[in-house]
Image (cartoon, grey):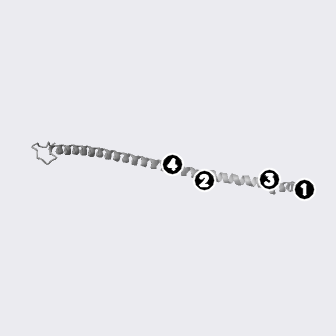
Amino acid sequence: MEAILTFIQAIIPTLIGPGAAVVVLLLVLLGIGFILYKTIIPALVGSLKQHQKDLQTIMASHDADRSAYMQSIEKITDRLEQMGDALEDLGERTSRVEIMLDLDNKPTRRKLKTE
């Protein structure tokens, strides 16, 4: 019995001293690591995957918007080219009319060409 008491008296300073603090610290760190591994890290991974999916959706939408924008710009460009051609034609017709009309307001017998 006395051997047991001597053994306990020898171990008690180790159990309540700095060695015990190190063991408790390691157990706490192990618990925190386990919590991180089981809950927080999977939640972060899921959140990042969802964020990546959202970004892909946004990029697809952006590509569709850009395509529609480019088509509308092409239509506007074509329409402006048509208007420019019409204005050139109008300018040519105006020049022909000025030539046919005498600038001194003298009437001419020439007929205007109609297209």
Q: Quadrant of residue 102?
A: top left
Q: Residues within 10 Å of mark 1 (few under 14, many from 20)?
A: few
What residue does disc 1 label? Answer: 2
Side of 27 relative to 51 (left or right): right
Q: How many marks?
A: 4
The residue that label 2 is drawn on is 40
Relative image position of residue 111 (x, y in whole percent)? 11, 43
How far across and how far down the image is residue 74, in percent? 33, 44
| Kind of residue indicated by mark 3 | Gly
Residue ID for mark 3: 19
Are the two marked residues, 2 and 3, in contact with CB atoms closer than 8 angstroms? no
Q: CA–CA distance between discs 2 and 4?
A: 18 Å
Residues at marks 4 and 3, CA–CA distance in whole angstroms: 47 Å
Task: Report which residue position mark 4 lands on.
Answer: 52
**Residue placed at 80% from the left, 53% from the top?**
19
Of labels 4 and 3, the one closer to you: 4
Q: Is residue 78 above or below residue 23?
A: above
- The quadrant of the picture occupied by the C terminus is top left
Please state the horizontal and vertical placement of residue 97, each as a whole percent of the image: 17, 45
